[in-house]
Amino acid sequence: MTMHDAPTSRPTRYGTRHLVLKAGARTLLDDFTHTFEPGELWCVAGPNGAGKTTLITTLAGLAKPAAGHVEADGAPLAAWRPEALARRRAWMAQTLHDAFSASVLDTVLLARFPHLPGWGWERADDHAAARAALARLGLEAFAARDVLSLSGGERQRVALAAALCQDAPLLLLDEPLAHLDLHHQIDCLAALADWLRAGERTAIFSCHDLNLARRFATHALLLDGEGGAHAGPVRDVLTPERASRAFGYPLVLIERDGHEALVPAWPDARACPDRRASRNPFHPRDEPMTTSTFSLPSVDPLDDAALRATLARIIDHKTKPPGSLGRLEALALQLGMIQRTSAPSVARPAMIVFAGDHGIAAEGVSPYPQAVTAQMVANFVAGGAAINAFSRVAGLALEIVDAGVASPLPASPQLVDAAIARGTRNFAQERAMSRDEALAALAAGAARVRHHAALGTNVIGFGEMGIANTSAAACMMSRLLDVPIDACVGRGTGLDDAGLAHKRAVLGRALERHAHAREPLDVLAAFGGFEIAMIAGAFIEAAHARMAILVDGFIATSALLVADALAPAVREYCVFSHVSNEAGHRRMLEHLGGEPLLALDLRLGEGTGAALALPLVRAAAAFVNEMASFESAGVANRDA
């Protein structure tokens, strides 16, 4: 194995890839993929036994996961030399045992070992680093004291000083607030936040005090002990709803004088339903909701200037006047940038069609009954729909996914069952889905993309089927782009004038009902469909996997609005196949900076427009790889 090393002058990006943690037969964390970025202060929270220590220890490279791996700067921890890894990350254990006497200063100086040259002793700068770490925690007067004479809280602060003294860009701290009184808990977290601001660093700590976490952490990872996890900005994760379910005790958020605190809602814990029996209090159906977690994958911007210049030079030196292939030249350059190569290709292109039903259909916003969704899924499986024909012509691998169809569907090898529930709720009366359902759908969409990535797909498109999904897309567009609903609502599957007026009125009232829904995930939960949410998750995962993404029409683009709001670089991976005949689509494209390849007045959905655009993508890759240059063909260039 090639051992990895790297200079410590740049920040470390730590991440997990499909990480699975187990305790015996019990799954603590299932298929967790995430990147921890410099400048972030993460709190790992969860009930006893949820896996906080196991996760911290695994992130440190001191425990082996059941599956997946941890990586630093893109290389698995197993590929790093121990001394190099020790300069990248520092680890503080939950419990400490001192077998021998030693001064506090000498104890902290031990953390400088990864920086010592060969067999050399500590240098003046090592002593300075140790004293600076002690000073950061108010421990200057402790330098000469014996560690065996310290109280539990004092020893904990010394351990934190040692971790800081190691001067690694990443800190992994297991229960650093244990044994500390409130004053020193706040001081230590303030010192940690100050340390973080002093450079491009990352810190991950576990603790049980949710209020201190909400005050000091930028992000949180909440473990439920059953394989699930929520990761994201701390105030999005440590909510009363999620914390109550995770800890099995009802919590409420109170506010006073500009301050917030999570406090118990009832004095008797027995008044709270069992944690496992109340995973989703917003789900009224008898069947259990699919439990999953969505960790926002990192999406790199296409900012390799050297590669861009190389591709432009190759394209301009083909046997043609510069720019004479029009949009194909920009498309070829985009493909090369996405694939990080000067010879872009189209490998195993795939189309995933997600199907789901919408509760808003009960309001009469579509001329077709809801049963048509299931009937069309059967048509997809049988191979008789437009997307089947177009996929065959274009050479697309076609997959059909049940994201949440209301009617039961027969099992079929051609149908992937990923249903979150049997359709969304009627958002004219309540939220279409809970936030957890939205996250589960995002995760399910991402999982389908990972499946195709493993098969070698590097170009992918997404289609949809769902009666009344234009209503969901219109409301999402109106709220996310802050435009009047009338500018977003079209005739869908063929409404007449009276039907169009009724649809606009229904959706206008729904927007008023959910006026509080402003953030992308809240908008998705308030109005979206399970198929739309899965497409949004698929967009982000496909960009993370550096696939070229064929964007279809109005519904798919509404999902892209959510993906773009969560991970703005996603749009750079998008090939906008066409502009549809549905009201609002052109405005969506303008917001995203998308220039469509085709304008065929399509309004069918299913991914049909994306399928029709694939031959143009193939042509763009082909001319870069197969067309002669002026030099190779012996043709004089205009500058010759």
Image (cartoon, helix red, strand yellow):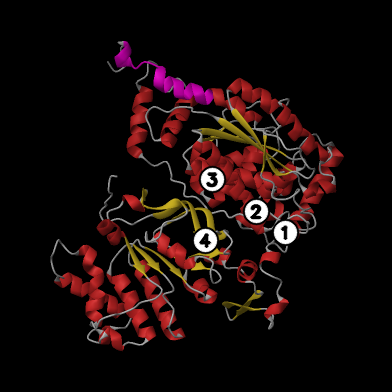
Residue 115 picture quarter: bottom left
Contact (Cβ within 8 Å) of mark 3 with mark 4: no
Magenta-span inclusion, residue 486: no
4 or 2: tag closer to the N-terminus: 4
Circle 3 residues within 10 Å: few <14, some 14–19, many ≥20: many
Contact (Cβ within 8 Å) of mark 4 with mark 1: no
The residue under label 2 is 438
User: From mark 1 to mark 3, how far is it between C-alphas?
Assistant: 26 Å
1 or 3: tag closer to the N-terminus: 1
User: From mark 2 to mark 3, how far is it between C-alphas?
Assistant: 14 Å
* Region of the chain picked out in magenta, as a range: 616-633
User: From mark 3 to mark 4, how far is it between C-alphas?
Assistant: 33 Å
Q: Amino acid at mark 1?
A: His
Q: Nearer the viewer, mark 4 or mark 1?
A: 4
Circle 1 residues within 10 Å: few <14, some 14–19, many ≥20: some
* Residue drawn at (34%, 27%) of the image: 313
Q: Secondary structure at mark 3?
A: helix
Q: Amino acid at mark 3?
A: Ile
Q: Position of residue 326 (x, y in %)?
A: 48, 23
Quadrant for the C terminus in the image: top left
Q: Secondary structure at mark 2?
A: helix
Check the image and name the residue furthest to the top. 634
For residue 125, side relative to residue 468 (left or right): left
Contact (Cβ within 8 Å) of mark 1 with mark 3: no
The residue under label 3 is 540
1 or 2: tag closer to the N-terminus: 2
